[in-house]
Image (cartoon, grey):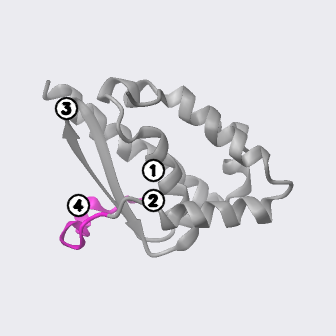
Amino acid sequence: MNLSIKEIEKEIIEEFELFDNWVDKYEYLIDLGKSLPKIEEHEKTNENIISGCQSQVWLNAKKQNNEVHFFADSDAIMTKGIIAILIRVLSHQEPKEIINANLDFINTIGLKEQLSPTRANGLVSMIKKMKIYALGFEKKL
């Protein structure tokens, strides 16, 4: 059985609390990006690019057994880490859970305030695109 979004958020908050400063937290984010479930090369299309991001980010989703599975890639290591953490929270969840997720952990770990305005906008765009995928899958039930 999969963990709930809230349980995964709690794990991430606890992991980030282990670090004393943002330099270490950035390193951790970069490491998370290395474990990102990769999007297929042929899916790196304009349709899958997240608009509003400073760097290029491709995101795709598939639905399997009423769970949404996200795949992504980016040309920037920090952005890879950010999308990886979102995928960790939202992948393997039911569409309605994704749509209703508040993602409070982002503010709790202080991520948004550490990002440049363009990266913060990109974070919001990533979340929006993931919720749009979930909404699309929910409508197809």
Looking at the rendered structure, the secondary structure element under dot 3 is loop
Residue type marked 4? Glu
Q: Earlier in the sequence, mark 1 or mark 3?
A: 3
Q: Which mark is residue 125?
A: 1
**Residue nearest the viewer, comparing 123 with 81:** 81
Between disc 3 and disc 2, the foreground one is 3
Residue 23 shows in the view: yes
Q: Residues within 10 Å of mark 3 (few under 14, many from 20)?
A: few
Point 47% across, 62% down: residue: 35
What is the x, y in percent for residue 120?
60, 54
Q: Name which of mark 3 and mark 2 comes first in the sequence.
A: 2
C-alpha gap between disc 4 and disc 3: 24 Å
- Does the stretch in magenta take in 116? no
Residue found at x 68% / y 58%: 115
Query: Magenta region: which residues?
Result: 39-52
Q: In 3D space, how far apart are the residues under numbered discs 4 and 2 (Cα atoms)?
A: 13 Å
Mark 2 vs mark 1, CA separation in Å: 6 Å
- The type of residue carrying mark 1 is Ser
Mark 2–mark 1 CB contact (< 8 Å): yes
Q: Residue shown at 48%/55% (left/top)? A: 84
Q: In this view, does 71 lie to the left or right of 17?
A: left
Q: Which mark is residue 47?
A: 4
Residue 65 shows which numbered tag? 3
Q: Name the residue under label 2.
A: 52
Residue 28 coordinates in the image, percent (x, y): 66, 61
